[in-house]
Image: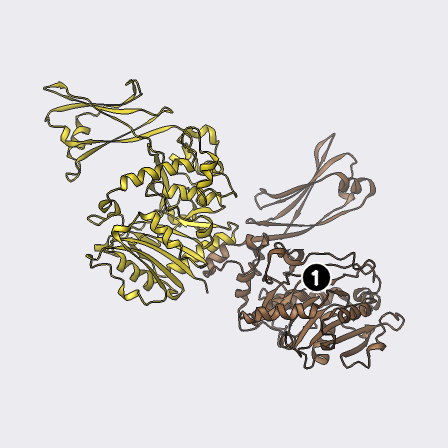
Amino acid sequence: MNNKETILLHLPAYRDPELVPTIESALQNAKYPKRIHFGICRQFNEDDKFDNLDAYRKDKRFHIMDVPYKEAKGLPWARAQINENLLTDQDYILQLDSHHRFEKDWDETLIDMHNDLEAQGYKPILAGYLPLYDPFNDPQGRTMEPWQQTFASFYPHGTIFIRPALLHGWQDMTQPPMSRFLSGHFCFARSEWAREIKHDPDIYFSGEELNLTVRSYTHGYDLFHPHKLVIWHSTMREERSGMLKWDDDYKLGVNFIQKQDYARKKIRVLLRTEEDPTIDLTGYDLGTVRTLRDFEKYAGFHFEKKAVQKYTIDNHYPPNPLIEDDYLWEQSLMTSFYHLVTITKQDFPETDYQHILVAFDDENGVGINQKYITGHDLDNLMKVGISIHYEEMFLTHKKPSRLVLWAYSNQRGWCERIEIKID
Amino acid sequence: MSKIFVSIASYRDPELLPTIEDLLSTADKPNDLVICIGWQHSKEDTWDTLKKYKKDPRFIIIDVDYKDAKGVCWMRSEIQQYYTNEDYYFQLDSHHRFSMGWDTQLKDWLNYLRCKGSYKPILSAYIPGYYPEKDPEDRVQEVWGLNIDRFMPAGAIFLRPHHVDNWQRLTEPFKARFISAHFIFTLGSFVKEVPYDPNLYFHGEESSLAARAYTWGYDLYSPHRPLVWHEYTRDGKKKHWDDSQDWKEKDNSSYARFRKLFNMDPGGCHPCERRRLKPYDFGDVRSLEDFERYAGLKFSTRQVHKETIENKFPPISGDYELGLCSQFKHCIDVYKGSFTETDYDTFAIAFLDEEGKDLYRQDANELEIQGLLNSNQDDQFMHIWRQYEDTRRPYAWRVWPHSKSKDWLDKIEEVIKYE
C-alpha cells in the first residue's frame, strides 16, 4: 500500500439515520483514517435531526453538499453531484450508499486487492452486493460470507433482474473472481473511473447498475467481486419506510412511472435494443475500448433476444468461454422468460379446489413450463381472498405464447380455465 | 490469450514434417501453440529431422532413439510431463492435415459446449482420412462416429469408425461413446485429471481413456464437420511393433492391466491392486456403471447394447438391461500354408467348449474358401471372421477342411487366449 494514497468515500444520503454511524464505522476501522475523505450529498429534511453533520464540517477530509429533500432528483443525480463537485484529487473512489459497516483495515484490504489486480494488467473495479448488517443488532447480525451478483432473468422492459448469491468457493480463493455486474451500492476503483463513467441523472433508479456495468466494461474496465468480507450494507427500507425518496416523490406528486419509463427507454437505447433519435446519449454512451458484443460474450447475455447461456445461469464466474463465431455464439443461448403471474379470487369462485395449474404453452399448445398452486397459497386465495402474485422465470428454447390457469376441483375435476395471451 | 498444448507422438514418420508445417500454416494463432513432439527416430532416417524447430520457443522436442521407444502410450505420457497449464490440450498422431483456422474452430466448438452447460467437454473422433500423395484432393469429406466393434478375447475393446448419416444437418458436435487417441481436443485440466497410462501398449488405450475421462466428469463429443484429417493406410511405414522384439509381451501385460481396471478378471480387482492403478484409475464424479449405461455396454459380461450396435448416438434412450446383447465376435487366423489341396468344398468352422463340443458352427462354402485363399497375397494368414449371440465364451476354435477328392482332412484347432 502506497503511503499517501487517499480514498473518497462517495456517500449519497437521503434522510438516512445511518449516515453518521456509517461515517464513524469507516473512520474507526480504517488503517489510515487521515487518508479517508468523504464526499457526501446530504439530502435532508430539517425535521429529521439524525443526519446532522455539523461535527465534521470543519474537518478538511469532509466535502459536504446539502440539498433540501424537496430538491432532490434521484439517486443517480445525487451520485453525479458527488463525482462532479466533491471528488478532487483523491486517488481512489469508494462508491457506497449511506448505510454501511466496515471491517478492520478495510482501506488497506481494498487497495491491496485492487493493486494486485492492476499489477496483473487489469483495470479493476471491485464491486458487488455487500453482505448485510442489522443496524439494530450489530455486529452480531452481520452476514459472514461474501456475495456475488447473479443473473436472475430479463425484465420485459429489457433490463436484467440481478440477484445476490453466495460467492461460492470464496474460502479457497486467492484473489477476487471476475463479475458480470457492478453494484450501485459498492464500487471501488481509481478515481479516474468516476470521472470517466458519469452517472446519468435520467436513469432514475431503474437499471442504474446495468447502465454502469456495460459502460464501464466497454470503456475497458474489468469487473471483480471481493473474495473477502470488507464492508456490510443494509437496505434500511423498512426502517426508513415513509422517508424514502419514492415515498416523498409520491407525496410531492412526482410522476414516478413516467420517469421510470423514460429511464428504461434510455437503457434500451444504450443496449442497442431500441432506436430512438430523440434520446441523446452524449456523455453517457458506451465506450470504444470494447464493444457491446464483447460484453455480451463475456457475461453470456444477448440483450436483443433476451437470451442467456446456461453457463451464466449456473453461476460460473465470467468470462464465459469465448465463442468467436457470432452465429455459433447465438446458437448457444437460451431465452430467458419472465412473467408476473397474478391469480385473483374473482376468477375462481368455487371453494373446493384441490390445486390450480399455472402453465405456459407454446403456440401449438404444447407445455413449456408448469406448476401447481396448492396448500397455503391456495388457502389464502380461497379463504382469505389474498391474490397470488409471483414472478415466474425460466429458460427455454421455445417461445411461450399463452398462460393457462386451470383449477381442479375435488367434485368436478378440471373446471375453471383461463387463457391469457402473451406477446 | 489462450494457449493450446499440442501433443504429437511420432515414430520414424515421413509425415511428421509436413504435419507440423500444415499445423502451423493453417492455425489462426500459431504463436499460441506449445508443440511437444515425442520424436522417436533413427539416425539413419533422413525424413524427420527437426533442426528447423529446435530453437523455436514454441517447440518442446523429446529426443528418443527408436530403440529406446516403449510404445505410444508411454510416449504420450512422457509428452504430458511437459504440460504447463495451457488452456487447451490437443493430442494428435504425427500424420495429419488441417483446415484453415482449425484452432479457432476447435476452441469455438469446445466453448460452445461449455456455454451450453457441459463444463468438461472432450472433442474426439476417428477423423476422416487423407492421402499424402493426393492431398488435398483426396481428403475424405465425411464425418465418422466412433463405436465398439467387439470385446477382444483378452478383454480390451476393439473400436471401429462408422458413417454418420446426414452429418451436414447436424448443427453442433454430437455425443460420442469413446475417445480416439489420434484426435483429442479438450481442456488442459484433462492432462492433470486423466493422465496417460504409460503401462498400456496399444489396444485398450482408447476405451480405457474414454471410461476414465467420463468418470472424471468429462462429456464425450465428436466434431460434426470434417476439420482435421488423419492418414490411415500407412503402407510400408515403420511402426513400433515392426522394430520391437517384445511387443507381444507388452501387449499382454497391457491387456492384464485393462482387465484389472475394468474388473474383468474372475474375482474382480483386489483393493490393493486397485490402489496401484492410481493415478490412472477412475474418477469419482461418475461411476464405471454410469459410463456403461451411457455408452451402452457392460464390461464384466462383455455385452453390447442394441442401440450401440445400431450406432445410435448415446446416451442409451431405451431400457439398459433389456437391450444388452451377448455377442461373441472373433477372428480365426490360420496359416495359409496349411492348405495345399486344390479342391476344397467345405471348411467346417466351429467354436468349442473345454470338452470339445461345438458351441457354434458356421461352415465356409466354396465361395468363401476361394475368397480366403486368394485374399491379400502378402499376408501369410487367412482371417476368418465369425460372430454370434451367446453368453458362453468358447474355449477353442476348429477349422476342419474337406476336399472333394480326399474327403475330411486334418483338423486345425487352437485354444483361444483370453489373457
Q: Position of residue B135 (x, y in %)?
A: 24, 56
Q: Quadrant of residue B362?
A: top left
Q: Is B234 in front, or is B39?
A: B39
Q: Position of residue A129 (x, y in %)?
A: 68, 61
The amino acid marked with disc number 1 is: Leu
The residue pinned by badge 1 equals A130
For residue B164, say whether it is visible.
no
Q: Quadrant of residue B380?
A: top left
- In the displayed structure, does residue B117 sit left or right of residue A92? left
Q: Is B418 in front, or is A257?
A: B418
Q: Residue at x 15, y 23 (%)?
A: B345
Number of marks drawn: 1
Q: Colour of chain B?
A: yellow
Q: Colour of chain A?
A: brown
Mark 1 neighbour class, 10 Å CA radius: few under 14, some 14 to 19, many 20 or more = many
Whether residue A60 is situated above or below residue B130 in the rendered picture: below
Question: What SS does tag 1 mark?
Answer: loop
For residue B141, say whether it is visible.
yes
Q: Position of residue B50 (x, y in %)?
A: 27, 62
Q: Quadrant of residue B202?
A: top left
Tell which residue pokes out farthest to the right in this image: A47
